[in-house]
Image (cartoon, rainbow, N blue to C red):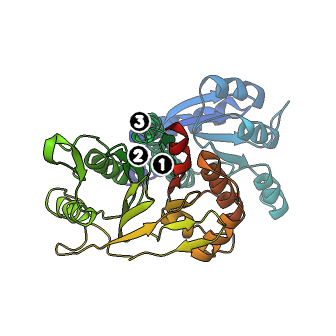
């Protein structure tokens, strides 16, 4: 009869899918009874488990240190160290995967079961151990171990991916640092003095690189051209576009600067600024494969008369601070460049007097937000400039950026901040003669 029952149990067990071999499940059997260990071990070995034995909690800890098991079957009542103490020490061991702990006990009272769970046990088996029940308990443990292994594999993949991303990020960061240096080099000089005028520039991108560009091009002894450009967006693609635009406007040679032209006797002159902006509009729409557009102010200043011609295309109005402190902001507005193929652009004139300052600032100034998301605006820009009375050149622009940061409560600027400062001072030219 006993042989028949064993045979029946083995047949029933054979119907349960055998995942132990595929999963390489390690099982440690801990019991001070050699006979109990052998009975359970024989059953598990037939099922494909990798099995080891220990006769006490102390020796089991030594095995765990050398051979971390996935599942522990431990007797509750053992000399030296009982199953509860061993369970606590086993759960405290450092390990990568999960260790599933099953207590073998003759105890069945609820308070004793609760005590075992509090010590970290995952499940219980009543002695003497029933083969089918043992298999069912192990199957439950295997599901948890399998899910934990899958999660661990995913964690490893995520960790490896993050490490690869860190490597790529570091590489990109180094490239962006170099790109920032190259973009800053497009502004050849932060300050330039001429006979009768001074030009100063500031370019402050919100990140490594941005979409703003400021610069100038000498025309003659009495005339100088300068510009402020703001490409839509900011980042690498915007910076690349500013670099290309710099190639059209910064050279002193008519062969490389579309704003310049050869006149009689090979002298250099300036094309109508509105025609220059029309050409830039055509270039963006027909030659550049980009979704970006940009705003711009082109200016041509006579350093003897103070007569200044400007062409505004979507850029904020130029700001003039007169020598007596009065501030003016006016312009034609105009459409941005690169949106409409038939766009037309207008020129207008300003007459500067000795001591007057002309500032071409990007919308990163006028649209700078404060802590409650209120923009500085044109009125705020005027008020800010009134507070900078007496400042000139780079000091004025640096203080402007500092005051703007103060307005933003020292938060990072969300957009590029750039400006050109033109200061008309013909008296200096008279003194040189």
Q: Tag 1 or tag 3, which sits nearer the N-term?
A: 1
Q: How crowded is mark 3: few (under 14 residues within 10 Å), some or many (20 or more)?
A: few
**Which residue carries the number 1 mark?**
146
Residue visible at 29% across and 51% down? Answer: 245
Q: Where is residue 392 in the image (x, y as percent from the top left)?
A: 63, 50
**Which residue carries the number 3 mark?**
175
- Along the horizontal axis of the image, is 293 left or right of 364? left
- Along the horizontal axis of the image, is 153 left or right of 63? left
Mark 2–mark 3 contact, CB under 8 Å? Answer: no
Q: Nearer the viewer, residue 419 or 51?
A: 419
- Along the horizontal axis of the image, is 405 left or right of 348? right
**Which residue carries the number 2 mark?**
19
Residue visible at 65% across and 60% down? Answer: 404
Q: Tag 3 or tag 2, which sits nearer the N-term?
A: 2
**Mark 1 falls on what kind of element?**
helix
Q: How crowded is mark 2: few (under 14 residues within 10 Å), some or many (20 or more)?
A: some
Mark 3–mark 1 contact, CB under 8 Å? Answer: no
* Residue 316 in view: yes
- Along the horizontal axis of the image, is 321 left or right of 185? right
CA–CA distance in space, label 3 to label 1: 43 Å
Residue visible at 34% across and 76% down? Answer: 334
CA–CA distance in space, label 2 to label 3: 51 Å
Q: Tag 2 or tag 1, which sits nearer the N-term?
A: 2
Tell me the quarter of the picture where residue 66 sits.
top right
Residue 381 is marked as none
Question: Which mark is nearer the camera, 2 or 3?
Answer: 3
Q: Position of residue 181 (x, y in %)?
A: 45, 36
Residue visible at 44% across and 68% down? Answer: 350
């Amino acid at each position: 009869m006993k042989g028949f029952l064993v045979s029946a149990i083995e047949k029933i067990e054979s119907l349960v899918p055998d995942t132990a071999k595929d999963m390489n499940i390690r099982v440690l059997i801990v019991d001070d009874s050699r006979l109990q260990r052998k009975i359970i071990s024989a059953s598990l070995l037939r099922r494909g488990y990798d099995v080891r034995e220990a006769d006490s909690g102390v020796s089991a800890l030594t095995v765990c240190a050398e051979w971390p098991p996935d599942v522990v079957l431990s007797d509750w009542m053992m000399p030296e160290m009982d199953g509860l103490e061993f369970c606590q020490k086993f759960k405290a061991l450092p390990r990568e995967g999960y260790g599933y702990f099953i207590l073998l006990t003759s105890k069945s009272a609820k308070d004793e079961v609760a005590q075992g769970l509090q010590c970290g046990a995952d499940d219980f088996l009543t002695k003497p151990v029933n083969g089918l029940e043992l298999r069912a308990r192990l199957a439950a443990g295997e599901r948890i171990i399998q899910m934990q292994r899958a999660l661990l594999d995913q964690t490893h993949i995520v960790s490896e991916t993050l490490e690869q991303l860190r490597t790529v990020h570091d590489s990109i960061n180094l490239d962006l640092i170099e790109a920032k240096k190259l973009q800053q080099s497009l502004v050849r000089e932060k300050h330039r003095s001429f006979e009768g005028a001074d030009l100063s520039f500031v370019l402050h991108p919100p990140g490594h690189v941005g979409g703003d560009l400021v610069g100038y091009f000498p025309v003659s002894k009495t005339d100088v051209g300068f510009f402020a450009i703001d490409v839509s967006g900011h980042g690498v693609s915007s910076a690349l576009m500013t670099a290309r635009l710099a190639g059209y406007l910064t050279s002193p040679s008519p062969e490389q600067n579309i704003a310049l032209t050869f006149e009689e006797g090979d002298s250099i002159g300036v094309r109508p600024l509105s025609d220059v902006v029309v050409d830039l509009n055509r270039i963006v729409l027909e030659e550049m494969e980009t979704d970006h557009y940009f705003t711009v102010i082109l200016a041509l200043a006579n350093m003897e008369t103070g007569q200044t011609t400007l062409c505004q295309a979507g850029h904020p109005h130029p700001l003039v601070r007169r020598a007596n402190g009065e501030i003016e902001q006016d312009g034609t507005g105009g459409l941005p460049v690169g949106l409409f193929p038939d766009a037309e652009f207008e020129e207008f004139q300003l007459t500067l007097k000795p001591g007057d300052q002309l500032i071409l600032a990007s919308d990163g100034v006028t649209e700078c937000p404060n802590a409650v998301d209120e923009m500085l605006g044109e009125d705020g820009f005027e008020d800010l400039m009134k507070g900078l009375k007496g400042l000139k050149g780079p000091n004025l622009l640096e203080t402007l950026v500092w005051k703007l940061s103060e307005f933003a409560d020292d938060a990072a600027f969300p957009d590029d901040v750039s400006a050109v400062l033109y200061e008309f001072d013909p008296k200096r030219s008279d003194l040189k003669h």
